[in-house]
């Protein structure tokens, strides 16, 4: 099969819509569905522990048990991140992402049975299994973007794909509360999530592909355009690349991404897992309205993320600012904007529901800028090893995701007291501030020299070359 890579960028094909957009849409749906399955427990657990009108089981789980269930997802999530990144980098993520989504669907279908017959321990086991399978997702997606997204379109396609997280959050928070309050009860939340994963998997079998070179549906023109503009080697070349571990771990820009990712995970997942509880206990919102109001901040994040991505591409492509300046500006909006909003919320007197929801909406909405901040820096530093970099940072950040709900149990003694939640917000504020500070000081937008390391057989080739040189003398 012909390889179209060369040093001269290829012009865009005549058609503005192509297979890269189909792949991006499928990845967008994958993240949408996967996030919906993650978030489902945050809302469903409120329904599972509250009386209902349809005689579905009600569980007497203390707050500490509920937070253990919510955090257990990340116990499995962090395990396969790095292996998944390495496998996706060397062999492509086609079958990894398919297997992950199928298994996630099956586990979701088993949650109601596990809860009834095995109580919270069995639910934790399901959440851990779900975390293991979803741990394959983000490294694979970053690998796909490295192969399928031309540099000029990377901000828009990357944001479009990762914004699925917010759409999944919005859909699940709204539908979970409605399904839980309906005659189908809280089990239907998990059945819908499971079926959605299986349906996505069927679509991926038909249309999915790791690279443009292995796609059955792509045109020659579009393939040439992508392969000459994506700055990533093909899968066959990747199989021969040895991972530059020393280069990665001694790279300050990589550490800037890692620390920013950890700050994002703690701040984001604290709000995502605990917002329904805050709404219920402090703002006194009922179960049916809880999901709708909890979804509002993520709707703002979803919509603003597209504005931020368009603005980032506009500023960089028009040479108004450099790529690295763009990353710094939007990451600052994503981190320090929410930090200021959370500080205001911390001192808001009780009884101001509308104002509290507005502040939370601003907090989460501004955080959408991180999709054109540190989230794309993996691809900036190393298109060839973006999946491995994402695997590392997502694994370490997953530890902070585990800490998010557990930290609430540790510091909040009375869930109905707004002053107790102030401690939670202060933790998020400090992580947002310090994470972005390190990022803007040390990040770069340049491809690192270790992006093109020696091939596994270079040493052998080098020895042969030396022997040839000696023989000439």
Image (cartoon, rainbow, N blue to C red):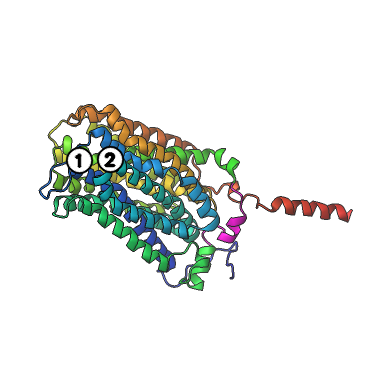
Q: Residue 317: which quarter of the image?
A: bottom left
With respect to residue 401, does 471 lie above or below? Answer: below
Residue 305 visible? The answer is no
Mark 1, other Cα within 10 Å: few <14 / some 14–19 / many ≥20: some
First in sequence, mark 1 or 2: give its number: 1
Q: Is residue 350 magenta?
A: no
Circle 1 is placed at which residue position? 59
In this rendered view, identify the residue nearer to me: 426 or 373. 426
The x, y position of residue 163, in whole percent, is 34, 53
In this rendered view, identify the residue nearer to me: 431 or 235. 235
Q: Is residue 239 magenta?
A: yes
In this rendered view, identify the residue nearer to me: 73 or 8. 73
Q: What span is in magenta?
A: 229-243
Circle 2 is placed at which residue position? 120
Q: Are marks 1 and 2 in contact (CB under 8 Å)?
A: yes
Mark 2, other Cα within 10 Å: few <14 / some 14–19 / many ≥20: some
With respect to residue 473, does 275 lie above or below? Answer: above
> Residue, x 40% and y 37% (percent of image)?
399
Give the alpha-carbon distance from disc 1 to disc 2, as whole Å: 9 Å
The x, y position of residue 324, in whole percent, is 47, 46
> Residue, x 51% and y 68% (percent of image)?
223
Magenta span: chief secondary structure: loop
> Residue, x 45% and y 45% (percent of image)?
325
User: Quadrant of the image for the N terminus?
Assistant: bottom right
Q: Secondary structure at mark 2?
A: helix
């Amino acid at each position: 099969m012909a390889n179209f890579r060369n040093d001269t960028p290829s012009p865009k094909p005549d058609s503005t819509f192509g297979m890269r957009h189909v792949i991006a849409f499928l990845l967008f749906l994958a993240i949408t569905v996967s996030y919906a399955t993650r978030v489902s427990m945050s809302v469903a657990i409120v329904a599972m522990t509250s009386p209902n009108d349809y005689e579905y089981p009600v569980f007497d789980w203390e707050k500490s048990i509920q937070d253990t269930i919510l955090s257990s997802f990340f116990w499995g999530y962090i395990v396969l991140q790095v292996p998944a990144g390495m496998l996706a980098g060397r062999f492509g993520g086609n079958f990894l992402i398919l297997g992950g989504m199928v298994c996630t669907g099956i586990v979701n279908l088993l949650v109601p049975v596990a809860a009834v017959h095995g109580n919270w321990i069995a639910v934790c086991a399901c959440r851990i299994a779900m975390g293991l399978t979803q741990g394959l997702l983000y490294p694979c997606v970053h690998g796909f973007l490295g192969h399928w997204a031309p540099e000029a379109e990377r901000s828009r396609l990357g944001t479009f794909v990762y914004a699925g997280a917010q759409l999944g959050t919005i859909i699940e928070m709204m539908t979970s509360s409605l399904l839980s309050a309906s005659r189908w009860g809280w089990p239907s939340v998990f059945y819908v999530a499971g079926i959605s994963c299986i349906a996505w998997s069927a679509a991926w079998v038909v249309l999915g592909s790791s690279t443009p070179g292995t796609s059955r549906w792509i045109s020659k023109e579009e393939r040439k355009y992508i392969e000459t503009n994506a700055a990533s080697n093909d899968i066959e070349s990747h199989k021969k690349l040895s991972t530059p571990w020393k280069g990665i771990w001694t790279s300050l820009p990589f550490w800037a991404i890692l620390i920013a990712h950890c700050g994002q995970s703690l701040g984001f997942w604290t709000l995502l897992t605990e917002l329904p509880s805050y709404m219920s206990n402090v703002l006194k919102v009922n179960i049916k309205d809880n999901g709708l109001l909890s979804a509002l901040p993520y709707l703002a994040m979803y919509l603003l993320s597209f504005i931020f991505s368009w603005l980032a591409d506009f500023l960089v492509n028009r040479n108004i600012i450099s790529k690295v300046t763009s990353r710094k500006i939007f990451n600052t909006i994503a981190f320090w904007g929410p930090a200021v909003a959370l500080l205001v919320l911390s001192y808001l007197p009780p009884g101001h529901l509308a104002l509290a929801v507005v502040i939370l909406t601003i907090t989460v909405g501004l955080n959408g800028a991180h999709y054109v901040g540190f989230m794309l820096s993996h691809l900036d530093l190393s298109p060839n090893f973006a999946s491995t970099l994402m695997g590392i940072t997502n694994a370490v950040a997953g530890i902070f995701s585990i800490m998010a709900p557990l930290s609430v149990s540790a510091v909040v003694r009375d869930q109905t007291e707004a002053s107790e939640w102030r401690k939670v917000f202060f933790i998020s504020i400090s992580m947002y501030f310090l994470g972005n500070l390190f990022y803007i000081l040390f990040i770069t937008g340049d491809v690192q020299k270790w992006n093109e390391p020696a091939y596994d057989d270079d040493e052998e080739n080098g020895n042969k070359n030396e022997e040839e040189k000696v023989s000439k003398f």
